[in-house]
Amino acid sequence: MSNGAKVAVGGVVVGVALMMMIGFWPGLLVMVGVPVAAYLMLDKTQRRRLQRITRKELGR
């Protein structure tokens, strides 16, 4: 199994557990809000670099 697949499976497991513990909408808010907050915390140059590279290059 590739690293990307492992991360996806882990994300699904954590998401389902989170939704079972705190409910659907708060769980969805956490699952969407954490990556958005992390992206917004990046510096302007880091955001530009992240937009420039492809998904395939993110794993390097």
Image (spheres, grey):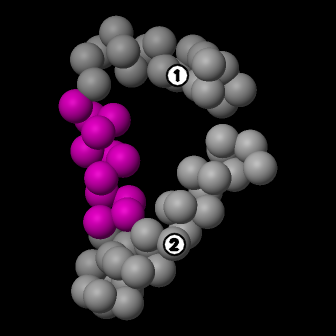
Disc 2 residue type (three-letter)? Val
Q: Nearer the viewer, residue 53 or 3?
A: 3
Residue highlighted by disc 1: 51
Residue 5 magenta: no
Disc 2 crowd, CA 10 A, few/some/many (<14, 14-19, 20+): few
Disc 1 residue type (three-letter)? Gln
Judge from the rendering whether residue 6 lies leftward or rightward of residue 27; answer left or right: right
**Tag shown at residue 37:** none
Instruction: Examine the rendered structure and indicate whether residue 42 appears above or below residue 18.
Output: above
Give the x, y percent position of residue 32.
38, 60
Say whether disc 2 or disc 1 marks the residue closer to the N-terminus: 2
Which segment did they paint magenta? 30-41
In the rendered image, the quadrant that contains the C terminus is top right
Instruction: Examine the rendered structure and indicate whether residue 24 appears above or below residue 1.
Output: below
Residue drawn where x is 48% and y is 21% of the image: 50
Instruction: Examine the rendered structure and indicate whether residue 52 appears above or below residue 10.
Output: above
| Quadrant in the rendering for residue 15 | bottom left
